[in-house]
């Protein structure tokens, strides 16, 4: 399943709208990705705040993700 970074989510609904499998569901005050996810990556590309990312662990903040991405690109 694709990690969902709650600290970055602004509850815009972009992931909900774009998912072809309805694998995103409302859960309290935020969205979550369910087991129906086939990791197509559409939500990852569409998320304006990088709250969904295939290459980071759950709980990683946006700033840490940007730093990790920059470090990886420098290699």
Image: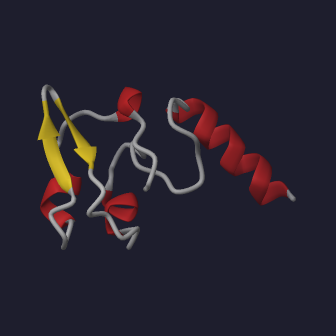
In the displayed structure, 27 sits above or below 23; it is above
Residue 43 placement: quadrant: bottom left
Work out whether residue 12 or residue 34 is closer to the camera in this orientation and state it.
Answer: 34
Q: Residue 3, image x and y in percent? A: 46, 47
Q: Count the marks.
A: 0
* Residue visible at 27% across and 52% down in the picture: 34
The colour scheme used to paint the residues is secondary structure
Q: Is 33 situated above or below 45?
A: above
In terms of image quadrants, where is residue 60? top right
In-image side of 6 versus 74 (left or right): left
Determine the image quadrant of residue 73. Answer: bottom right
Q: Is residue 21 above or below residue 61?
A: below
Q: Which residue shows up at 12% across the image and 40% down it?
A: 26
Image location (x, y in percent) of residue 61: 52, 29
Q: Residue at x 15, y 47 (%)?
A: 25
Would residue 62 appear left or right of 43 to someone viewing this image?
right
Toward the front, the furthest residue is 35
Residue at 42% across / 46% down in the picture?
Answer: 50
Pinpoint residue 23: horizontal percent, then vertical percent.
21, 59
Q: Farthest residue to the right: give it.
A: 75
Compare residues 4 and 38 and report the one nearer the observer.
38
The answer to whether 45 is drawn above or below residue 28 in the figure is below
- In front of the other: 58 or 35: 35
* Quarter of the C terminus within the rendering: bottom right
20 left or right of 2 in image: left
Quadrant occupied by the N terminus: bottom left
């Amino acid at each position: 399943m694709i990690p969902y970074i709650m600290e970055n989510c602004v509850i815009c609904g972009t992931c909900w709208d774009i998912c072809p499998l309805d694998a995103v569901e409302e859960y309290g005050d935020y969205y979550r990705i369910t087991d129906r996810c086939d990791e197509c990556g559409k939500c990852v590309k569409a998320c304006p705040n990088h709250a969904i990312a295939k290459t980071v662990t759950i709980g990683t903040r946006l700033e840490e993700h940007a730093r990790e991405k920059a470090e990886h690109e420098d290699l």
